[in-house]
Amino acid sequence: MTGSRYRVARVLLLVVCLAAVTGACGSGAKKVASGPDTTVAPGGPDTTDSAPKAAARWESVTTLSGAAGTASPTFDILVGAIQWRARYDCASGALKVETTPPPRRPGPIIDTPCPKTGEGFSIVTGSIKLTVTATGPWKLVVDQQVDTPLNEAPLPSMATARVLSQGPFYNVEKNGEGTARVYRLADGTNALRIENLMVNQNTDLFVWLDEAKSPKTSRDVSSAQYWVLGNLKSTVGSQNYTIPANIPIDRVNSVVIWCEPVAIAYAAASLAK
């Protein structure tokens, strides 16, 4: 291979590798589940003119159940929701679920023999009425997919709780801002509150408590002792997390937003005690 062709090949290989890494954790693309009615209108729904968009997440709406016969429950889906789903579990016979208003693609969102588990989808929002026809026991769990900021209120006991440590978020590999506070609640348990968070969109992010003080790189974070609290609830907004009793809170020096697929720290908050 000539020198010029070799250099071109190396550039192309580098571009492909960078694209693969970016797509794994950091593209911010919304994940839309497959189903009988998942087409999203151009641009997607929007509830405000200026509110920042969070990575798409599923929020619980209601849980329904019944036996053989017909049921007609109703519930509300946020007007700005991307889509909603009904996760079903039926024990015997058959299950059919129709909606009013109907989905964009005509027909029931669920029509299946049982026993079976699965999902039915719709992008129609607002007040929804289901017509559930079954010949055996059934259960439906309804969730809506949204990209609005999450604004969880502080836990009631945080109003009088002692703040053990706190600090602002700063950039590590990606952009991040907001505040982290660790509380000792009245019952002796510990809790983390993250307020006004804004971090790069992704659906594969986790909240870590880390022993590293003011970590500047992903290696600083991962090479220290860390404890995983769980999935980040939303990339934008305020949220609470209960800290398990087996985590030695006196050894926690930072809160980290961690991207698991490519093992990088998006942002961190150094905790002043």
Image (cartoon, grey):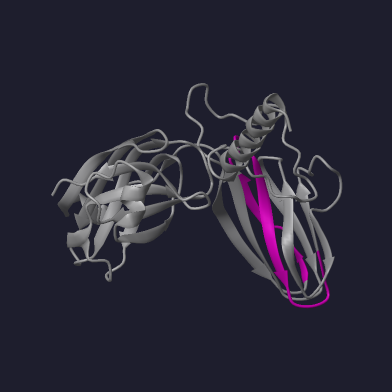
Magenta stretch bounds = 69-95
Magenta residue check for 62: no
Q: Is residue 24 left or right of residue 161?
A: right
Q: Nearer the viewer, residue 53 or 106?
A: 53
Q: Residue 35 at x, y = what percent?
A: 77, 51
Q: Nearer the viewer, residue 149 or 261?
A: 261
The relative height of residue 10 versus residue 31 in the rendered view (above or below) is above
| Image mark count | 0
Residue 185: name its quadrant. Answer: bottom left
Q: Is residue 161 left or right of residue 147?
A: left
Magenta residue check for 80: yes
Q: Is residue 48 left or right of residue 153?
A: right
Q: Nearer the viewer, residue 35 or 172?
A: 172
Q: Residue 104 at x, y = what percent?
A: 80, 39
Residue at the far front in the pictured view: 2
- Quadrant (top left, top right, bottom left, bottom right) of the N terminus: top right
